[in-house]
Image: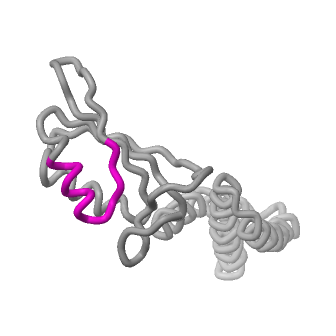
Amino acid sequence: MLALIQPALLIFTLRVVDISLYTMRIFMITRGRKAGAWIFGFAQAFVYVVAIRAVISDLGNWLNMLGYAAGFATGLVVGITIERRLALGHLLLRIISARHGMEIAENLRGAGFAVTEIPAHGKDGMVSLLICNIFRRHLDQVREIVTSLDEAAFITAEDVTPLQRGFWRGRNGPSRN
């Protein structure tokens, strides 16, 4: 029985690595990081060939196919988890607050973040719309500042690619990019 399980576990592990690399490669591509995409693509292709060779060498072994499929699904989750921990790239945050917009903006600026305030009209009247571009690694810090001042604030985030200079918070405080 061990002779049947070992190849399946190897295939599972190879697929987890393969798909994790694939996921990272896609994130590199979407962020325009050519060198990272090349490195992850090369490694992913190599691991894929080794995994598929192991499956094809014994097509009658259903455990190998199960390991292949389970490794694929697990690799997606592992890849996303790794990418979130690395927190590469930039985010555009939109923060809507009915009563605490100015206070949120002041606290974010005090923490070194650039914020643009826009008066807006919501369903129940005037609100503050705050626009804040941040490095993804600072998302938890910004969310904590906002929710500590206004738990009802509405926050959205989307990935952005900076095209021209602007203010970005650096590692040790504010900096110009």
Q: Nearer the viewer, residue 21 or 29?
A: 29
At x 29%, y 63%, the residue is: 141
Look at the image and name its color scheme: one colour
Q: Does the magenta stretch include residue 146?
A: no
Q: Which of 55 and 104 is in front in this view?
A: 104
Examine the rendering and report whether any part of residue 166 can be seen.
Answer: yes
How many numbered marks are there? 0
- In the rendered image, residue 137, in percent from the top left (x then y), is placed at 42, 65
Q: In this view, does 30 lie above or below 121?
A: below
Q: Is residue 142 above or below residue 96?
A: below
Horizontal relation, residue 21 to residue 148: left or right? right
Q: In this view, does 97 lie above or below 9?
A: above
At x 60%, y 63%, the residue is: 75
Q: In which quarter of the image is residue 69?
A: bottom right
Q: Which of 70 and 39 is in front in this view?
A: 39
Q: Is residue 9 above or below residue 162?
A: below
At x 50%, y 55%, the residue is: 166
Stretch of the chain drawn in magenta: 103-116
Q: Quadrant of residue 52?
A: bottom right
- In the rendered image, residue 176, in percent from the top left (x then y), is placed at 48, 65
- In the rendered image, residue 107, in percent from the top left (x then y), is placed at 19, 57
Q: Quadrant of residue 35?
A: bottom right
- Quarter of the image with the N terminus is bottom right
Horizontal relation, residue 27 to residue 171: left or right? right
At x 70%, y 67%, the residue is: 18
- In the rendered image, residue 66, in percent from the top left (x then y), is placed at 66, 59
Horizontal relation, residue 153 to residue 134: left or right? left
Horizontal relation, residue 85 to residue 59: left or right? left
Q: Nearer the viewer, residue 67 or 155?
A: 155
Examine the rendering and report whether any part of residue 63 can be seen.
Answer: no
